[in-house]
Image: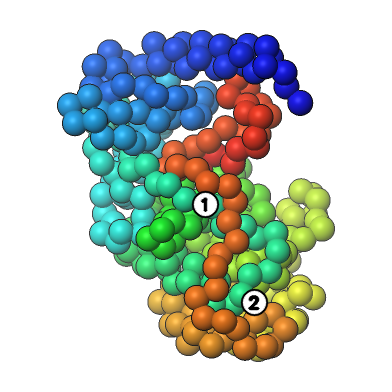
Amino acid sequence: MMHSRDNQAFRNESARADRSAWEGVAATVRSRFESLELLHEGEVVCVFSARRVDDGRLGALKVLTPGAFGHAPTRARLAQQAHALQSLRTPIAVRLVESKLGGPGPYLFLEYVHGHAISVGTPHPAEAAVRVGLAVCQVLRELHGSGFVHRAIEPSHLLVTRDGIRVLGFGHVSEDGHRLTAKGIRVGSLAYAAPEQLRGDRPTPAMDVFALGVVLTGMLTGGSPWRGKTIAGIVAASSSAGPFEDRQLALLPRAWRGLLAAMTHRCADERPGVDEVSFRLAALGDGSPTLDGAAQEPRAPLTARRDRGAGAPTPTPGTGPRAREAEPLRPTS
């Protein structure tokens, strides 16, 4: 446990890191926003909770670090995220409030979403999984229809809010069939990456279907198709053919078992599209059985991690100057 003197030293160090990072932001951006806290500091991107000066609106401000101003691929990724968010009309996706993509200080100013990231460590009622699945499908339908792939569907990017499920984590978005990251550079969490994503193949909507299938599997069973495998084992398993075999899936009702096995099929061409997934989830709606086959209570609550505002990354637990006493969530975009 940290003593009060240690706490004060920690806060002082954090404040210095905030000021140092903010001083590196382009003057044109600093004149428009007031920094409140440094949420994430990476090699090429920093994210701050910030207040817009002219109207006091709070949000998540994503900017490039000074060394990345002239790095064309990084600027292209920022622009692609902006274009993807602008293509969405569903209120389920985090909203892009304002952006500036040209000049020396490009930035994105995102809505700040307050909520809880869903938990997949213990089984949820099936109706909760249906609600999450249908919400994500609505976002993916629009995103894929606009020619983009999310590439990072995972629990920390799916928030439970007072208004329902919200989808974040668009920092890895890519155009369908186009790769902005180098071959072999994986994006998103390993546990939710499709086999072809692990191999560094070009992104397709089937990657998002796989990731959603893993999320729903975790919600219903508390596990993952990759359960118990090392990184080397995951990569080796990704080269196999056919659906995953999961003993926990065998405990689910047939309709769930069939849907999740199809969504997490190792062959991308064998996975259903988002429209089919949405149709099958809707059929599994209210009154669908739980893991043990018993009838469930309607509108069962979702298990959630601790409350936070999101729409921007948070630090990885225990690393760098932004470590906190309470364990924060991992980066979200």
Q: Mark 2 points at which residue?
A: 261
- Depicted 313 relative to depicted 104: above or below: below
> Which residue lies most toward the left here?
54
Position in image of residue 211 (x %, y %): 57, 61
- Depicted 128 relative to depicted 203: above or below: below
**Residue placed at 49% from the left, 37% from the top?**
313
Position in image of residue 67 (x %, y %): 43, 16
Please identify the quadrant where the N terminus is shown: top right
- Depicted 136 relative to depicted 105: above or below: below
Tag 1: amino acid? His
Residue 191 found in image quarter: bottom right
Within-10-Å neighbours for mark 2: few <14, some 14–19, many 20+: many
First in residue order: circle 1 vs circle 2: 1
Q: Name the residue under label 1.
A: 116
> Which residue lies most toward the front here?
4
Q: What element carries label 1?
A: strand
Q: What element carries label 2?
A: helix
Residue 110 appears in the picture as rendered: yes
The label shown at residue 100 is: none
**Residue placed at 60% from the left, 61% from the top?**
303
How far apart marks 1 and 2 lie (CA) works out to: 28 Å
Nearer-the-camera pick, 322 or 179: 322
**Residue placed at 73% from the left, 60% from the top?**
226
